[in-house]
Image (tube, rainbow, N blue to C red):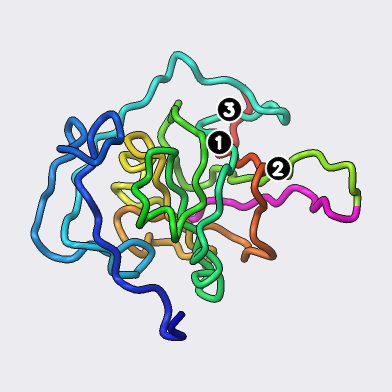
Amino acid sequence: MSSVGPQPLRLPRVAANGSGQGNLKGCGPTDSGTRKVAGKTTGKRAYNMTTHTNDNTSSLNAEGLTLKYRGVIQEIGPMVEEFLPDGILIFFGANAPAELREVSLVHDGTHLHANLAVGDQLQFIPAPSTNASATHPPMRFRLTAVGEMANGNLAQLGHLVVHFDAATTANLPGTISVEPSLEHLPLIGTTFEISGLEKK
C-alpha cells in the first residue's frame, strides 16, 4: 500500500435499492467534476441530496435527549485508519458501494428523525463486553458546524463525514465538525447516536 494516502475512488450511481443502478430519487448528478469526501477526491460525480426526515418517529435516548439518528457500526473499512491523523471519520449506510466501504464505517442506521444542528451531541456507545479491559467508556462530542448537504446525505445514504476539528464552518457541504478531538477509533458493534441537546 502506498504511503501517500487513499487513492481516488470512483463514486458509482446509486439506486434507491442500493444496487448501483440509476440514481436515488431526488439525488441526481449535479456536475461532471471530481467529488471530494472528507477533503479527499472520490470520483467523478456529485449528488444533490434532498433531506427526508420523519419527525413523527423521534424518540428519546438513554439520557432523555431527542434522538435524531442512531446506527450500529457493522464494518470498518481497511483504509479508515488512514484518515485518523486528519481527524476524519466517514460513515456510510449498509448499501455503500464496495469502493466506498474501504474508507467508511459501515452502519445499519436508516432514519434521520430531525435535521442535525450546531450544538447537537454525537455519542459513541461501545457494545457490552465480558472483557472489562477491552471496553472503552462512551465518547461524546458537540457539533460545531453542519454543512448544507450533511442532512440530505445522512437521510438518503446514511453517509456522514465527521471532522474532529471544532471548526465553526463546515469544511465541505456534506460534512460536519465536532469537538473535542477523537481519542480512538470506535469498534465494530459500537452504537453511534446524534441527539438534540434540548430535553423533551
Residue at screen point 80% across, 39% down: 128
- Amino acid carrying mark 2 in the image: Ile
- Amino acid carrying mark 3 in the image: Thr
Dot 2 or dot 3: first in sequence order is: 3
Q: CA distance from mark 2 to mark 1?
A: 10 Å
On screen, 111 above or below 104? above
**140 drawn magenta:** yes
Q: CA distance from mark 1 to mark 3?
A: 15 Å
x%, y% of residue 169? 38, 61
- Look at the image and tell me whether residue 131 can be seen: yes
Q: Nearer the viewer, mark 2 or mark 3?
A: 2
Residue at screen point 64% across, 60% down: 185
Q: Tell me the residue that label 3 is attached to.
A: 66
- Amino acid carrying mark 1 in the image: Gly
Residue 71: numbered disc: 1
Question: In the current view of this chain or complex, which residue is farthest to the bottom?
Answer: 3
Q: Tell me the residue that label 2 is attached to.
A: 125
